[in-house]
Image: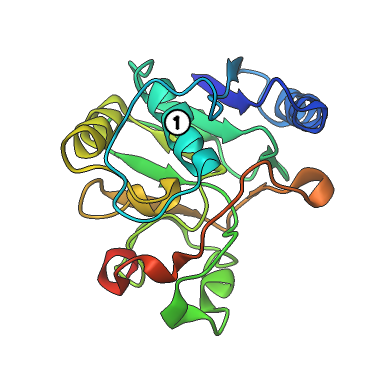
Amino acid sequence: MKAYVIVLETDPRAIRAYEYVKLKMSLCYPEIELIRFEATTPQTRKYNFKARQLLTETEKAVIESHYNVWKCIDEPTLILEHDAAPINRSYDIVELASEEFDVIELSHPVWTPPAYNDGSPFEYYKKNDGLVRRDGKWKCLLGAGAYIMSKNGATKMMKEIETNGAFSLDVSIRQPVVEIYDLLPAFFMQSFENYSTVEHTKYNNIPIEIMQ
């Protein structure tokens, strides 16, 4: 199994975070081949896809970074942001990954849909339920820091963005475009050094039905 780690090569903090991710992956999943993948920046963007909400230039670059990884997928593949590291080896993700699943989310949420601002998504990701199909409480990823995507899932996502355009990355990866499974409890954690390389817009300009 391969794991692509998307790294903003112009940011020393991102490189430090990657080194931490590399260490944690070597301890928890030494059998996974780690590939350092250069992130797209606003200056190196090549695609002019339709934005379906107001997006910052860095948000557009994030979408293109993941899109470029999807183009490389020929088998179930782990995709990591530069600061998403496993807490432990809770599951054998190599054994679980298969073309049967479009997307398996592994990371703790980094935001919540407006209708769930009571914190319920955070409680959901603490459940000890194993691999479960997303039950419809919210349709999209709540952060795309760590997820497994199959070739079939990558094909669906690329077609969606090329045909219909994109919301922010984690909102773009949503049902029914792809079928999403969660591996619970979530055991990849983001935000090494508590910073983000992305300037975000507010999610309140996305139709509520898109997120949940």
Query: Is 167 on the left or on the right of 170, as rendered?
Result: left
Q: In the orientation shown, which residue stands out farthest toward the bottom?
A: 118
Query: Is 197 on the left or on the right of 134, as rendered?
Result: right
Vertical side of 109 occupied by 73: above or below: above
22, 39: nearer the viewer: 39
Q: How many numbered callouts?
A: 1
Amino acid at circle 1:
His
Q: Residue at x 34, y 56 (%)?
A: 53
Residue 32 makes an appearance in the image: no
Q: Which residue is drawn at 56% across and 27% down?
A: 41
Vertical side of 85 occupied by 36: above or below: above
Query: Is 88 on the left or on the right of 151, as rendered?
Result: right
Q: Position of residue 173 (x, y in %)?
A: 35, 47
The picture quadrant where one finds residue 23 is top right
Residue 67 makes an appearance in the image: yes
Q: Residue at x 35, y 72 (%)?
A: 137
Report which residue position mark 1 lands on. Answer: 66
209, 93: nearer the viewer: 209
Q: Residue at x 72, y 43 (%)?
A: 88
Q: Where is residue 198 in the image (x, y as percent from the top left)?
A: 62, 44
